[in-house]
Amino acid sequence: MSLIRAFALVALSLVVLLPVLPPVGRAQAQQKDEPAPEPPIIGVVDVQRIIREATAANSIREALDEAKERLEVDIKREGEALKAEEQQLRNQQTILAPEAFEAKRRDLERRYAELRRQVQESSGRLARARDAAFNTLRTEMYKVLTSLMEEQHINMTLARKSVLVYDERMNITEQVLKQLDARLPKVDVVIGSGEE
């Protein structure tokens, strides 16, 4: 009985919907009269190459390397000073009263912990400065890309890493790189102070 009801329901639905649906032949005729849409113009950009080769990206890396080098020199100098004090404290262990030795040992441990904290904070500041600088670079790269897309009437741009095979004529990386270098030759890397 339920099978007969199902067929009846389908038949009733068809009777109700048929007058509302457009005739197939008329819709196909309308599509033949309309001009075919233009094929999309697609560009391919090697973002990783731009991040590697852009003049601004190199300026960011150089500034970060210099800052990291200065940090390493400072840390090494402070670490060596603490090691020298530790050796001096070991030499004085037999001379100092146990309470005095213990107090100096705790102070030295506190200063080692402070140095480790400073290293972590400095690393965090460098990472934040790197991220901010490369975000500036990416923002400018997207502006260049948008402008280039308008100039060349490109409908869509794909990242090179997302495309397996493509016609090399679609590659606009070199054009983006040249315009980016002209618009943004350098990015200032701002490393925050320890009082953030």
Image (cartoon, rainbow, N blue to C red):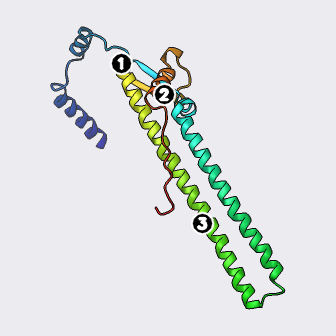
Q: Residues within 10 Å of mark 3 (few under 14, many from 20)?
A: few
Which secondary structure lies at badge 2?
helix
Q: Position of residue 129 (x, y in %)?
A: 51, 49
| Residue in front for this viewpoint, 45 or 19 | 45
Q: Position of residue 66 (x, y in %)?
A: 61, 46
**What separation in Å lies between label 3 and label 1 (alpha carbons)?**
51 Å
Q: Residues within 10 Å of mark 1 (few under 14, many from 20)?
A: few
- Seen in the picture, residue 122 relative to 93 is either above or below; the reply is above
Q: Nearer the viewer, mark 3 or mark 1?
A: 3
Q: Residues within 10 Å of mark 2 (few under 14, many from 20)?
A: some
Q: How many marks?
A: 3
Amino acid on which disc 3 is placed: Arg
Kindly tell me whether residue 192 is visible in this rendering: yes
| Residue in front for this viewpoint, 9 or 96 | 96
Checking the image for residue 117, the label placed there is 3
**What separation in Å lies between label 2 and label 1 (alpha carbons)?**
18 Å
- Seen in the picture, residue 144 relative to 127 is either above or below; the reply is above
Res 156 → quadrant: top left
Q: Position of residue 9 (x, y in %)?
A: 23, 37
Kindly tell me whether residue 153 is visible in this rendering: no
Instruction: Looking at the image, tell me whether mark 2 or mark 1 is earlier in sequence order.
Output: 1
Residue position for label 1 = 151
Which secondary structure lies at badge 1?
helix
Left or right position of 110 against 196? right
Residue position for label 2 = 181
